[in-house]
Image: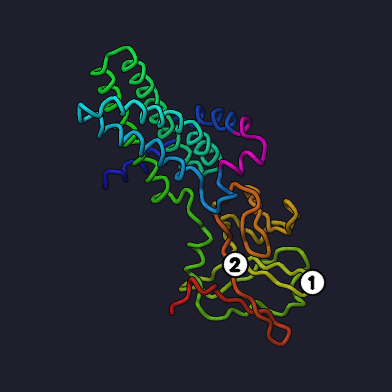
Amino acid sequence: MSLLGALDRIADTPTFDKAIAPARAAVRALLRPQGLKDLLHGTWLGHPLHPVLAQVPVGSWVSAGILDAVPPTRPAAALLIGTGVVAAVPTALSGAADWSEQEVGVRRLGAVHAVANTVALGLYVGSLVARARGAGALGRVLAYSGLGLAGGSAAIGGHMSYAQSSGVSHSATAARGLTHEWIDIGPMDDLPDRRPALRTGEGQGVPVPLAVVRRGTRVDVFVGSCAHLGGPLAEGTVEQVRGADCLVCPWHGSAFELDEGQPRRGPAATAQEKLEVRYVAGRVEARLPGRHLEG
């Protein structure tokens, strides 16, 4: 087993679920305004916000560690530590917003990640206090302890992102299973108006679900797995969200513009994979966009 592979055992263990549930409920209550949640998810950015914000405290604290190692530059380390402490607040809020909408295994690891980061933050605050009181040596010990803990916690965050697919686009992953040829969706007249319909595309071994929406004489075709957590978009609804016709996921309510597939409401932060469409003798055909095709 790999070093970080051991984290999967934590993700499989329900021991602390009773403690995690009220914490999740509290986060959801605190971040109830949809606009605030979308801001923290990064829906407006087209990319999860948490890993962007995390660069500030991590970068500040690593840089402070370097300055602390060189006696003449130690006074400047306190400024970087303080920058990291301040930046940790919005970083934690964005992480909490994402964590509250993830599947159970990610929530379990995320709880460990959050506790470790909280302790690391406390160590850095203690380091600032020690330095202000003239106890520089203690301040450095606390700071390096915080850096070690924050580094370990960052590794847990990386495992959540890459090994457990937290924050990645599940629709992009599903799109890679589709054939690169035009897919026959069927007669346009067979598609219900303004209601998602399930169709399948020929895949590289297994069929890939597609969510198809007709609006009059226009048809939009999406990969059927929601970008957020792979929810079945063909079982969703078509709704007006912030002035745009959107395909809404039935699992967590993410809303994607029908015109471009961009997210209009989270928790999804990335666009939904949309296929090119053409009409041939009353039938609809769809194909992956150029970014997925070989040159």
The amino acid type found where label 1 is placed reads Gly
In the rendered image, the residue lying farthest to the top is 133
- 194 displayed left or right of 290: right
User: How would you rate the neighbour count of disc 2 (Cα within 10 Å): few for under 14, some for 14-19, many for 20 or more?
Assistant: many
In the rendered image, the residue lying farthest to the bottom is 281
Residue 216, numbered label: 1
Question: At 61% across and 58% down in the image, what residue appears?
Answer: 262
Frontmost residue, 120 versus 247: 120
Tell me which segment is drawn in magenta: 28-40
Quarter of the image where one finds residue 40: top right
Residue 8 magenta? no
Residue 109, numbered label: none
Frontmost residue, 156 versus 261: 261
Residue 2: x percent and y percent? 27, 47
Frontmost residue, 281 versus 150: 150
The amino acid type found where label 2 is placed reads Lys
Residue 274, numbered label: 2
Residue 142: x percent and y percent? 29, 22
243 over 215 or under it: above or below: above
